[in-house]
Image (cartoon, rainbow, N blue to C red):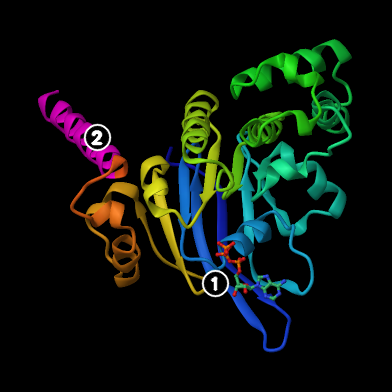
Amino acid sequence: MSHPVLTVENFSVDYLVDPVVHAVKDVSFELKRGEVLGLAGESGCGKSTLAYGIVRLLKPPAMITTGHAVFHSREGYDIDWGDLSPEDLRAARWDKISMVFQGAMNSLNPVISVRDQFEDIFETHRPEMKKKERRERCGDLLERVGVDRARLNAYPHELSGGMRQRVMIAMAMALEPQIMIMDEPTTALDVVVQREILREITRLRDELGFAVIFITHDLPLLLEISDRIAVMRHGEIVELGNALDLYTNPRHEYTRQLLASFPSLTGDRGSFVRGAMDDRLLALDAVSVGEEQS
Ligand SMILES: Nc1ncnc2c1ncn2[C@@H]1O[C@H](COP(=O)(O)OP(=O)(O)OP(=O)(O)O)[C@@H](O)[C@H]1O
């Protein structure tokens, strides 16, 4: 887990409006291979701008003013996303880094079947793939996210919101990218479905080894699913650390405030999240005890 799959260096984004909005300011971090990195911070702190900036999906008036986002391939070569032509960028998205954005479930085309939208990814990015193999892969991917492959014949409006979101996640995994960026991928869903999908994402991460940048203002949720968490405020990362450390020993005053703003983390009644964190602490204790004994 120690080698980075992505290095973001001195990344800044402005919105050239009057007055100029400095949405992301000199942000640097590394995403390690296979880790879930949570990006936390209140609305407007620049999380989405950073994510869209990394994959160069920003449109004017946004402008990247400084910095790089460099992808490190498994094969050992580096790609600076800022150096790619628009065509290469299109090819690299989905393939190297894929994205599930807010309300992604609404980005499925309502008049095209799930199968055709799915197969389109392979037709575009893997034109050499045989039709039969393509069909099989689409069905397998759907089943991976807990959707029956018979649903390939459905049109998006025939699926529930949760299912549509699962379909989007399956599509994001289609080309086996090494990074998935997820910006509030489950916010529009009810809590039970949200949890199911998150469990699925972490399971798939364990199985397939991709890294995830998971963006949400829901810090308790991030504490549950992330290996490390970056806390953003006013366009800057003010603290980045192991999720457990951040929960038990926050160093930055803003992180403390953010933790305190979630009663489920600090309140007397306890909660599922605190339970989950306690489980993680216990598991960690067990590991360190094991290490001492061995
Ligand atoms: N098109 C735009 N023009 C001008 N300012 C913008 C534009 N889009 C975003 N901003 C500003 O950039 C800053 C960062 O916004 P951004 O959407 O990245 O934050 P966020 O943390 O993702 O918020 P949220 O959780 O609400 O999505 C905010 O101050 C926002 O008002």
Say whether disc 2 or disc 1 marks the residue closer to the N-terminus.
Answer: 1
Q: CA distance from mark 2 to mark 1?
A: 36 Å
The residue at 64%/51% (across/down) is: 102
Does 35 appear above or below 231?
above
Does 244 appear above or below 54?
above
Q: Residues within 10 Å of mark 1 (few under 14, many from 20)?
A: some
Relative to 168, is 224 on the left or the right? left
What is the span of residues highlighted in magenta in the rendered image? Answer: 274-294
Q: Residues within 10 Å of mark 2 (few under 14, many from 20)?
A: few
Callout 2 secondary element: helix
The residue at 55%/69% (across/down) is: 44
Q: Out of 44 and 125, give the one closest to the viewer.
A: 44
Q: Residue 35's mark?
A: none
Tag 1: amino acid? Asp
The residue at 30%/52% (across/down) is: 264
Q: Out of 208 and 253, give the one closest to the viewer.
A: 253
Magenta: predominant secondary structure element?
Answer: helix
| Residue 173 image-quadrant placement | top right
Where residue 130 sits in the image (x, y, percent)?
Answer: 87, 14
Q: Residue 279's mark?
A: 2
Q: Quadrant of ligand 1?
A: bottom right
Q: Residue 26's mark?
A: 1
- Ligand 1 within 8 Å of the CB at mark 2: no
Tag 2: amino acid? Asp
* Quadrant location, the N terminus: top left
